[in-house]
Image: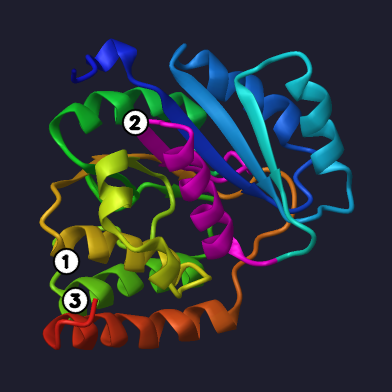
Amino acid sequence: MQKSMSDKKSLVIVPTYNELENLPRLIPVVLSQDESINILIVDDGSPDGTGKFVKDEMQKNNRIHLLEREKKMGLGTAYIAGFKYALQNNYDFIFEMDADFSHDPNELKNFLVAIKDGDLVLGSRYINGVRVLNWPMARLLLSFFASVYTRIITGMPVKDATGGFKCFRRKVLEAIDLDKVKSNGYTFQIEMSFKAYVKGFKIIEIPIIFIDRVKGKSKMSKKIVREAVTMVWKLRLQHMFGKL
């Protein structure tokens, strides 16, 4: 028997490395958005005590969960671990979200509305104008044109291909061989969306305002940019030759 929307469970996956400054504020706001929402922290051995804090919070609230990893292993592998956890524990809607408040947790309700009509909801910084605050112009232009470049090369009809605020229906993750997802930087976002697109899932973009991180240090690097430039061609060629 199919679940009604009111019976469906959601999991917000938040990868962390040294996010102790942000989590005490983030977790309560996430959980307050809807009673169906749980949160999973995937922590890469943060030396600042992030993991211990989450363990303490788990004793107070059974909607808080933790996956601990021994060392820093990258964004992509953190999300893959979270996706597998979500599928194993029968969640219906699975979110990706940053820990640093660059993604506004108050938007989660809007994603839950949009996912009723789609299979993958992307939070877009480039719908209804450019919706990014506190970024230097060079980084803003890099991000914007990276999305344009990705759209041209892959043919994927989305305005913000590199954004990391998104919501999947579980059937999308079930249809993707998660063990074959190789990207581990910001190109992970492109690869996951592209694999959903070529499998025919309905992608919806909703506008969000992206605010540069409030506390802590950005993980962006030149290596991540280089990976993005080459990955889009790799994805297109794999699709052309039926190897996705």
Q: Residue at x 30, y 80 (%)?
A: 232
Whether residue 158 can be seen here? no
Magenta-tinted stretch: 73-101
Q: Upstream in the sequence, badge 1 or badge 2?
A: 2
Judged from the image, the secondary structure of the residue bearing numbered disc 2 is loop
What colour scheme governs how the chains and residues are painted in the rendered image of this protein? rainbow
Residue 11 higher or lower than 182, as above or below: above
| Amino acid type shown at disc 3 | Thr
Residue at screen point 41% across, 31% down: 90
Tell me if label 3 and label 1 are in contact, CB under 8 Å: yes
Q: Which residue is mark 1?
A: 156
Amino acid type assigned to the residue bearing label 1 in the image: Met
Q: What amino acid type is highlighted by mark number 2?
A: Asp
What residue sits right under mark 3 in the picture?
Answer: 154
Question: Which residue is painted at 44% across and 53% down in the image?
Answer: 164
Q: Nearer the viewer, residue 127 or 108?
A: 108
> How far from the left and from the top, in percent, is residue 169?
28, 39
Q: What crowding class fits label 2: few (fewer than 14 Cα within 10 Å), some (14-19), or many (20 or more)?
A: some
Judged by depth in the image, the label closer to the viewer, 3 or 2, is 2
Q: How far apart, in angstroms, are the residues tagged by discs 3 and 2?
A: 28 Å
212 left or right, relative to 18: left
Closer to us: 2 or 108? 2
The quadrant of the image that shows the C terminus is bottom left
Where 162 falls versus 122 (above or below)?
below
